Image (cartoon, rainbow, N blue to C red):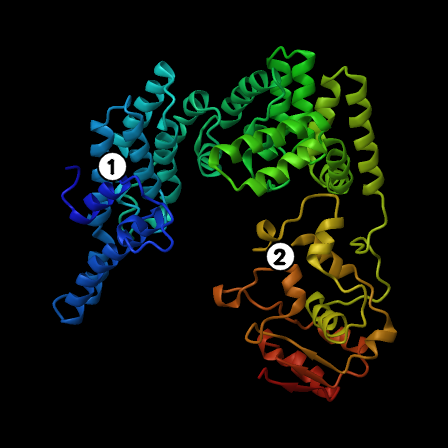
Amino acid sequence: MLTVHTHIQKNIDSIRNPNFGATQKGVPNKKHKTTVKNIQAQWKKLIQEQQGTIKRQYDRGLINGLECRSLMEADFSVEDEIYSAMINWLTTIDLSNSVEVEYLATFIEIVCSSDYSPNGLVILKYHQTLLAKIEELIEHQRVHQQNTKINVVVSGLITLYFYHSVNSYASGFVDQYELDKVDIALLLPAFYRVFPNQHSNLIMSIFEEYHPDVINEFTHLLQLSIVRHAKNSSYGWMHSELLSMFAKPADVLYKNAPLIFKNLINSFDFSDIEIDYLIENLMLSPLGIEDKKTQQARIQEHLKKLEIKGAKQSIINDYQQKLDNIDAVSQDKYNKNIKTALRRITVSAPTRKSVDILLKATTDEAKVTHLKSLLLEADVLKNTPKLFNINNKPTVLFRDFNFKLLVIEELMYRQEILLPKFDLDLFAKEYVKREIDREEDGYECIPEVKKYFKNVEIPMTLLDKVTQLYQDSGLNGGAVFLEHMHPFWDPGMGDEVPKVTNKAIDDLALLPNLTKIIGLENSEPSKKLLNALAERNIVLEEEG
């Protein structure tokens, strides 16, 4: 018996059932319907029932609100039973028994999900034990090289740490139970050496964020992967980590890609074949413009995985057809992706620098020609006229920028006569001096957008058409210009409206037909500004 909790023991017994997870359509036997999600839902219910017991004490007046919250935050006995069962199983298992290892892997798959909302404190109790077991399993596999699901067991245990951050801890416990993820990150180089094909974005994120020497360690892992895969031109998942099209500017490996490439070239004696492989798989393939042989290897690798997973024959046939028609597929893919790739080279400093480094590293004439061509085409793209010119020199000047923003809101987004209508996503696609990312940059005012609005020309013929202005506090959704200049502007979190100041008094002359301003109270206007507006018979109306 691995655990004293009857429900969890039943879950473990169900995993050993040959029909676990099987689809039982039309079969009335409910015992065979147990699945991973099924068990996670049961655990979630157990935890909620546990919390409900504490809540009932509060409802009956046996404890006060503060005590109720404290007890709920501190009570994680159900999760403790789950982890206890897992630790006991890890301690007693015969690793040569492949069937039992597979059962344990399934149990860990269930445990290492966030679906049942595990309490962040529970893993801390078993932290040192888990570290020791992970290290032990890695060493066991290194020595014995067993063809079992030990890799799934180890990766599952590591993934547990992805779901537990400081934010998941109960308030008041952080200082006492701080979990240092550096401990687990330090084991990851050994993990990747022993399980080189164990790809997980979650584990890689721990490696990137917490390993104190991630650049050096990742460089060595890449070298091993390049040598291993270049021999038979196979696909290595780690190769797309540097210059992936999905990488964000702040990603550690992405922003350090030039340094990693430089270290690879300078520190290791690669053959010409390996350099060629490196360029294709670490540079061109992530950009989506790799050669036919590289695409062929990628499709073959994917086909192999589909067959192992038992995918539908129709899906396998589809990829097989792509493989059979690789000449057409290769050219179609290149034509489709080249514009996106060129833009990435243009706007991304890490990508551009990486191309320069690899260009110097190869003596292959075809590769040299290809890389030089990419750089030349990127330069042409960089000099292409843009829809949104942030360096415009306007002839009509406003003293108060925030007042000008209200005018832009009226003419560009309400009347839609000040064109082109600015759009952040379109602007980000054509801007070439840096990568602008809504998700990364949107929590602050984006300086390039602010500069565009400052410099946008508003002709007097359009200014004559302004009869009213509206300053939105956010109650009615917020101004459209803010959606582009400060996408995640949130008055509920303390963000203020761009306030109009006394400088706007001089700007009133630019709007001869202005008769009303709605919502100006949001700027807390001075008496001087109010008097100037009254002198011009401009009516102020409160935001409704």
What's the amino acid at mark 1? Met
Q: Residue 275: x and y, percent? A: 67, 17
Which residue is depicted at the point 60% across and 40% down?
A: 247
Most foreground residue, 261 or 270: 270
Instruction: State the separation of the CA atoms marked 2 and 1.
Output: 48 Å
| Residue 112 vertical position relative to residue 45 in the rendered view, above or below | above
Q: Is residue 22 left or right of residue 189?
A: left
Q: Which mark is residue 445?
A: 2
Most foreground residue, 40 or 246: 40
Q: Secondary structure at mark 2?
A: loop
Image-quadrant location for residue 61: bottom left
Q: Is residue 432 left or right of residue 261?
A: right
Q: Residue 535: x and y, percent? A: 73, 87
| Residue 35 vertical position relative to residue 508 in the rendered view, above or below | above
Q: Residues within 10 Å of mark 1 (few under 14, many from 20)?
A: many
Q: Which residue is mark 1?
A: 86
Whichever of callouts 2 and 1 sits on the residue coming sooner in the sequence is 1
